Amino acid sequence: MSGSGWRIWPGTLLALGIVGLAACGVGALLWQAPALDATELWSSRYLRSVLVFTVWQAALSVFLSLLVALPIARALDRHRRFPGRGILLRLMELSLVLPTIVAVSGIVGVYGRQGWLTSLLQEWSPSLNWNLYGLNGIVLAHIFFNAPLAARILLQTLESTPEGQRRIASQLGLGPLWQWRALEWPAMRPVLPGVAALVFTLCFTSFAIVMTLGGGPGATTLEVAIYQSLRFEFDFGRAALLAVVQLLICGSLWWLVLRKGVTASLVPDRKLSGNSIRKDSTGVHVVTDGALLVTFTLFLILPLLAVLFRGFPGLLDALSPGDASLSGSGLLPATLRSLAIALPAGAASVLTALLILAAKKAGNFQLLSRLCEVTAYLPLIIPPLVLGTGLFLLLRPKLGVTNEGLVLVALINAVMALPFVLQLLRGPFNNLDPATVNQADQLGIRGWYRWRWLYWPRMRRPLALAMAYGTGLSLGDFGVIALFGAPGEPTIPVLLYQQLGSYQMSAAAASGLWLLLLLLGLFAFFNLLGRQPPRVKRVGHTVTEYPEPDHA
């Protein structure tokens, strides 16, 4: 397995397979799209309003998310040593894998008509006419998910500013405005277009948020319109046309971003910054930044607390397998169904990412490198629901058994998680010490032993983290499973959506809490697997413990 052929071909074939799968999906869309006249996109008032609303809510969400993320990143960069900073950073990373439908149920518990904050504000101002459903709720949920992700990536960029430049700025006595102009803005400007493109894509392809908080035809996006065309109207031509439009917009955006050489971190670096104290972190900034960070923390944590407090009383009843009269009695079968999809999807995404990275590293060909880059960004260019729509149209006559649909869901979920998994594994896999590699070559360490002694000690924790991310993303998926799943055999997100739709709020709260606990349990389990056992060397009567290397 150490030969260059064994390292190149499996990854290359998998990358080609993913490109071929996407091509089949897009081809099926193009095959079905001519059934509907493209001019109807503008002549139909409904389709035109769907397109305009999709672009408008995504653009507004990007603007407001960055408006929140920029001061949060600057405040966290100014204050690098305060109690709870590490927990806040981990909480901000949670937004990437937090199941959308769970967060939405928590947002409803805080900002909904009977929510905590809404009830409190109505006591102070009875004339307050706040409605969560519609554009308000969609944008609020998008900020909840995307502002922490953008702030974490921007913070990583700020922390990479050379310490020498900060020292010179401090010696020159530059104020906050000039530090922004001389240091912070030049550091963030190159990554802002990539971050904006990433957030726009996530908001543009949002499905679960719009389905639960949309509130009616006036707040319908392209993804929801595609789903409605396929599942309720059986208008496959219209679904294909809308999917092609969505593909063209997302593809054009990422083509422009990649053409300009702008890249965005899809997953923030998990390393914490040093404990150096900045001189501009005193005085009035202590008060303003403290108030800002406390408000932001409450914004993130209140929906999670709502899920916890509302779901805990009914959790045991929901997990009770024998009482069919309870609304949450389908939770255990839904859990097994979710894990049966998520675990293979996570494993497939990690294995595929490893083989693609090995092929790129061993091949060193420009064409192969470009193929790997295309594979890494393909799920962002072709959203999962668009890919699923194409495959649905392609396999529709033969896709009759539910299990076949679940296998397809696992496959698409694995492809969907691939960009994030690749980014987690790329650094540890490629940063192997060249001297160690040369020494292993000279000693003839190849095959399994090469993996065991060279890669495994460095890749153990990143692999566990990547497996947790891949599994978690699939566990909370509510887009593809809504297309291929059977309503009578739901996964947890689908069950939660059904309970919310039928106003079984206590059962929905219990299901949301259970999904959240399951996700945290998966992360804890994979974190435990990724821990390196301490290596102990006995020298005489002295026992020396070697700490685990510092990985990502």
Image: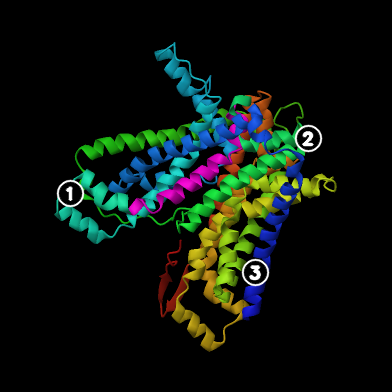
Specify the segment rendered in magenta: 187-214
Towards the viewer: 439 or 144 = 144
Identify whether 12 is placed above or below 73.
below
Give me the residue at 33% from left, 41% from top: 71
Give me the residue at 54% from left, 37% from top: 55
Residue pointed to by mark 1: 174
- Quarter residue 547 falls in: bottom left
What type is the residue that disc 3 sits on? Thr
Give me the residue at 63% from left, 42% from top: 245
Of marks 2 and 3, the one in the foreground: 2
Residue pointed to by mark 2: 234
Determine which of the numbered discs, if any, sits on residue 12 in the image: 3
Give me the residue at 62% from left, 50% from top: 382
Earlier along the polypeptide chain: callout 1 or callout 3? 3
Residue 102: percent from left, percent from top: 58, 36
Q: CA distance from mark 2 to mark 3?
A: 37 Å
Instruction: Inspect this view and state whether residue 5 appears.
Output: yes
Identify whether 313 is placed above or below 521.
above
